[in-house]
Image (spheres, rainbow, N blue to C red):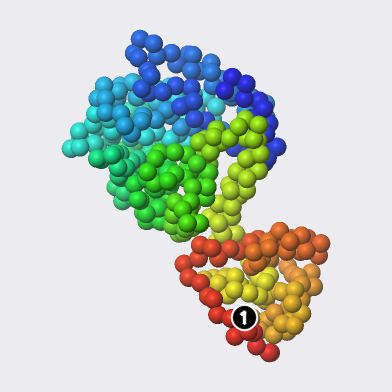
Amino acid sequence: MVRPGKGLSDLKETGFTHLMLDFGAFASVEGIEEESYRPDLMHRYYKGLLNEIDHHNMDVKVGRVPFLSPYTRRSDLSERILRMDIDCIRACEEIHCKNIIIQPLFSGVRSNSVWDENQNFYLELARQCQCEDTRILLVNQFKHVNGKPVRGICSEGEEAARWIDNLNETVGTERFGFCMDTGCCNLSGQDMQILATSLGQRLMAVVLTENNGRDNTCMMPFSCSYERRSNTDWTGLIRGLRQCGFDGQLILDIQDTFFAFSPFLRSHLLPLTKAVADYFVLQIELEKNLKKYSSRVLFGAGNMCRNYMKCYGEKYAPLFICDNNEQIWNKEFCGIEVKSPEALKNLPDDCGIIVCNMYYQEVKAQLQLLGVKNIEYFSDEYMPSFYYDKFNRDVTQK
């Protein structure tokens, strides 16, 4: 952290422009002793990082306060946590960072007073906010019972929604929101689709990270698998985020994967990390990208096109379908006329071309050579239903 310039340069060259400032890199709750707590020293550490971030024209969109380990059972930390979190809020507001992830109090909190203690804690934090648009984001937790991770505070969507609504009603403004940590969800067996839809517009950030379901690690999404399947239910997450119209911050936390590699190899992980981030954005914003156009044309008459028609054919009906196979031109596929790619040259400016083909990059290059704009991609990986009938059952002569 002393010389972060090279890392930031690599991130910027890869295409990243937004960062999360994790104050846990500069201080820890367990390491604080009352007489040695030095917020001025912490300020000096992160100030150097912020100067580098500004030099590279990058923005800090989210801050995360130091988290308490889920294994901690000390009962004397609440005041210290409050003090540190207030310092972090002030630091975030100084750099115009609007979203601050702050975990609920749990260590030393009696089960019959969890809400009361956390209500007082969060309301005091709200009183410390100076900027109108500062948002304090609660985050789901897990805990250990008999050596196994189970759901902790704010892991149930309806409960978390009640907390946020109550806090916002008390302060009289939309000061509070929620951050979903997929790692905690996976450890505690939480259904992320239900969690996301229960939270709705309260959900303002999602931490994307993977683990094996037993250990609290932060790995690259899709990198922890068993029998060719990821240990995390990414299908449920993406479906839930689509359903609730998620439009917040996506945060990739892959620190364990990153630091497991030799320093000589870490920069080579960044293009893959960017591709993973872009993939999640594409999947989550799929319907958002469909409805932003006044009309649509599909490219590719295959199973992916069938799945589009089954899920979105009525809601976002295409003008026609294009395909490179001239044998099906002027025929119908799923009841829609199939045309040559040349037909794309005469479309209105506000028409979107939705590629229904796994070879997206190749098709996109072809369309760009034709002068086509507004190219989007449809993926049926996370659709609620699929259609696998044979191709020739659906192609009919006009």
- The answer to whether residue 86 is seen in the rendering is no
Task: Describe residue 314's horizontal placement relative to residue 345 as left or right.
Answer: left
Binning the other alpha carbons within 10 Å of mark 1 as few (below 14), some (14 to 19) or many (20 upward) gives: few
Q: Nearer the viewer, residue 22 or 275?
A: 275
- The structure residue drawn at horizontal position 50% and vertical position 18%, both measured from the top left corner, is 43
Which quadrant of the view contains residue 368?
A: bottom right
Q: Image check: 179 left or right of 395?
A: left
Residue drawn at the location 47% of the way across and 45% of the way down: 210
Q: Measured from the top left, where is residue 267 in percent x and y?
A: 65, 35
Q: Report the label total.
A: 1
Q: Is residue 127 above or below residue 336?
A: above
Tell me, yes or no, if residue 42 can be seen here: yes
Quarter of the image with the C terminus is bottom right
Residue drawn at the location 67% of the way across and 72% of the way down: 300
Mark 1 is on which residue type? Phe
Residue with the most extreme left position: 112
Q: Position of residue 95 (x, y in %)?
A: 55, 27
Could you tell whether 23 is left or right of 58 in the image?
A: left
Nearest to the observer: residue 174 or residue 267: 267
Q: Quadrant of the N terminus?
A: top right
The x and y percentages for residue 317 are: 59, 74
Q: Which residue does the numbered mark 1 point to in the structure image?
A: 391
- The local secondary structure at tag 1 comes to helix
103 relative to 224, above or below:
above
Q: Quadrant of residue 51?
A: top right
Tell me if 209 is positioned left or right of 304 in this view.
Answer: left
Going by the picture, which residue comes out furthest to the bottom? Answer: 397
Q: Nearer the viewer, residue 32 or 21?
A: 32
